[in-house]
Amino acid sequence: MKIRQLKGNERKDAYLISTFCFHVRVENEEEGAKKSLASNIEDWGAFDDDGTLMARILNNKYEVYVDGTPVSTGGIGAVSTLPEYRNTGAIKEIFKALLKKAYKNGEVISTLYPFNHEFYGKVGYRTATKMNTYEFKPDVLSKYRFNGTVKRYNPGEPVTDYLKLYNGFAKKFNLAAVRDEKMMEDHMKVEHLYKDRRFCYMFSEGNKNIGYILFTDVFDPEAAILDADEAVWNCREGFNAILAFIGRFTADYGKVRLNLPMGIDLLRIIDSKNAYGIEKHCQQDFMVRAVNAVRLLEAIDKPSDCSFTVKVSVVIIPENIGIFYVTSSKVSVSKSKKKADIELNEGTLAQLCLGVLNLDEACLKADVKVNSNEDMLRKVFTEKKIFVGEHF
């Protein structure tokens, strides 16, 4: 078996493997392949001894915020193996090569959407609950009012105002992507407004933009669904404007699905005569792992008196092996012969650093051992707000 990055027409073959494995219906294979060839995303493949492409993985390059600081991130996608080559270990071998290269390329963390948590756990990824979805009837929000300006986005208009609002919002949440104009356009892209039924609305007071909502009108035989995948605000009035706007649709939709970041719990802040009408579902379809343990530990906020040691056990990336001494200003290899204050693996390290796991939860995991300095560890590894809006 040979593992390497793909190039040229090999990427067309890789595109067809993913098309087959993900049950995608395409009318024009050549057109779909051209889009794949034009991409600057890393494409990795495994070949058998005869040179046949067996499996592929994409690694999307982007940045996410970690405690307000952008860090280089890889987004794994299109993990697929032809049926005749499954159970050969091809995907694991690709991960070994891809993650080692990711470390050399400066990636700090790697993320993915799993089809199976256990499968990706074997290559070091751990679960991150990325947001909550709230389901309710629009009249749950009947008490909210907004008297400012509401403006619908029309395809082809500039997305500058949306992007500015998003990036100001995103840096308050870990794992939120740092978007550029192209990324924002992709989120708001609508080819046929009344066919795609995807709508974007901006809310303003005076001359100040205070929030927006992106939602899709989903057909349901009983009653249409307002599926709001992204809501962003920069003040309390902006958040209330979003709720008030949704509450206007009592005659249009039988149900609302509203995604909100982890750390913003609608059930704790809702003002409604029928709060029991809200169902809450956590989205656990996201996983993370550390690619560069030192740089991740450097990126997180730490108290001024920070001082602890961490031992990282490694799946795949040998540079993460060792005991590291962490202070508020520096992360270095520990020269002490004492046991580390905490022992864990690359995946759990990412969970704790990103704040998707607290220390009490970590202590319940079989792959974590706290030996000492627990008070300091509690000060460092706190729960944090999480928002994941990108797909790959």
Image (cartoon, rainbow, N blue to C red):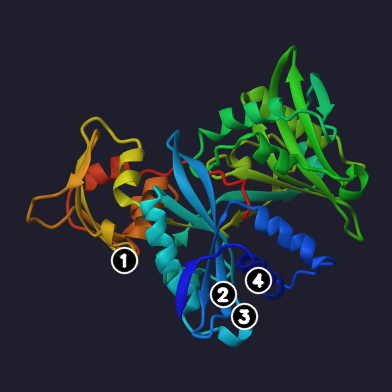
At a point 70% along the width and 25% down the height, the residue shown is 161
Residue 104 % position (x, y): 36, 53
Residue receiving disc 2: 55
Q: Residue furthest top?
A: 206
Q: Count the marks.
A: 4
**Which marked residue is nearer to the observer: mark 4 or mark 2?**
4
**Which marked residue is nearer to the observer: mark 4 or mark 1?**
4
Residue receiving disc 1: 367
State the residue in front, 136 or 34: 34
Q: Reading the chain from its start, which is encountered first: label 1 or label 2? A: 2
Q: Are marks 4 and 3 in contact (CB under 8 Å)?
A: no
Q: Dot 1, crowdedness within 10 Å: few (<14), some or many (≥20)?
A: few
The span from disc 3 to disc 2 (Cα, nearest Å) is: 6 Å
Q: Are marks 4 and 2 in contact (CB under 8 Å)?
A: no
State the residue in front, 52 or 58: 52
Residue receiving disc 3: 82
Callout 1: SS:
loop
Q: Reading the chain from its start, which is encountered first: label 3 or label 2? A: 2
Would residue 301 appear left or right of 162 to someone viewing this image?
A: left
Classify residue 318 by image quadrant: bottom left
The span from disc 4 to disc 2 (Cα, nearest Å) is: 10 Å
Residue 301 % position (x, y): 34, 35
Residue receiving disc 4: 13
The span from disc 1 to disc 2 (Cα, nearest Å) is: 30 Å
State the residue in front, 156 or 31: 31
Residue 131 % position (x, y): 58, 49
Q: Reading the chain from its start, which is encountered first: label 4 or label 1? A: 4
Q: Reading the chain from its start, which is encountered first: label 3 or label 1? A: 3
The span from disc 4 to disc 3 (Cα, nearest Å) is: 11 Å
